Image (cartoon, helix red, strand yellow):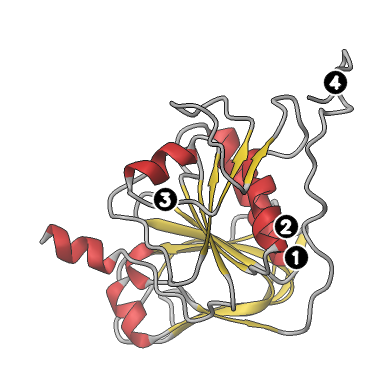
Amino acid sequence: MEQERQRRQQPRDTDIAATTCVVFAAGTYFGGRPSVPPNAFVIAADGGLDRAHALGIRADAVIGDFDSISGPVPEQSGTIRLPEEKDDPDLLSALKVGWAKGARTFHIYGALGGRVDHSIANIQILARLAAHGGIGYLFGDGTVVTAISDGSLSFSADAATRGAGHMVSVFSHSDQSTDVTERGLKYRLEHATMLNDTVQGVSNEFLTATPAVVSVGSGTLIVTFPIEAGLPHVERLHAFSGDLGALSTAVSAALATPRQSA
């Protein structure tokens, strides 16, 4: 039974780009072994290195200020040391490295649970990815969190059946998200406008043997869904431009008492 539960928890991404990036962060890990797709680029973000080691997974790149690893800083190509007093969190820096390697799909473990401020920050990072045409998935306790901008997430009837009765929730990250549609769920929404200060899409559910879609014409949605459903097919309404920004290894200029970079 345990093996079957873990098998059902493995992510299945029908929209894997040429390079998928798997990131191990330093936060809470839940049941089931993280899945690394073939040819994925693997990054350990700070204390996520200990998690990757424990799983027997070798990271292609290691990044962070290394304030939460149990051993020495690894001496390998692909190690990037960041100052402790910086502007970008370790996870965003890791995604910038993955983006530079060509990844537009990111599977992120250890980024939910624990400190609530970290979880909120990591969801904000998902929205930043989505705004530039990427997609990230945060794997939590039986739940996956993602963000989509000007596009749709589609779940097959089989996926919906695996997730039937579990919660699907949709929130507007943008001040306003327009032309929001939820089909194939217990509560149906058609071409609606959602606001980021109004709760309109919490606690929906998959239906058995019914394909489901969540879409937004303009804006960014945060979507949570059960891990049993697997990862959705992603479609976008237009091409996106820009990137996540340059990787910064500088000490924050916002410090009340300025310090020199390491």
Viewer-side label of 4, 1: 4
Residue 129 lies left or right of residue 159; in this view the side is right
Kindly identify which residue carries mark 4. Answer: 255
- Spatial distance from mark 3 to mark 1, Cα to Cα? 22 Å
- Spatial distance from mark 3 to mark 2, Cα to Cα? 19 Å
* Residue 236 visible (yes or no): yes
Residue drawn at point x = 30 percent, y = 64 percent: 9
Residue drawn at point x = 68 percent, y = 54 percent: 97
Residue 69 lies left or right of residue 216; in this view the side is left
Kindly identify which residue carries mark 2. Answer: 128
Whether the residues at callouts 4 and 1 have beta carbons within 8 Å, the answer is no
Quadrant of the frame with the C terminus: top right
In the drawing, what numbered circle is on residue 228? none
Q: Mark 2 or mark 3, which is nearer the start of the sequence?
A: 2
Kindly identify which residue carries mark 3. Answer: 140
Kindly identify which residue carries mark 1. Answer: 131
| SS of the residue under disc 2 | helix
Kind of residue sitting beneath label 3: Gly
| SS of the residue under disc 4 | loop
Counting from the top left corner in percent of width and height, residue 15 is at 53, 80
* Residue 181 visible (yes or no): no
Q: Nearer the viewer, residue 171 or 132?
A: 132
- Spatial distance from mark 3 to mark 4, Cα to Cα? 33 Å
Kind of residue sitting beneath label 1: Ala
Q: Mark 4 or mark 3, which is nearer the start of the sequence?
A: 3
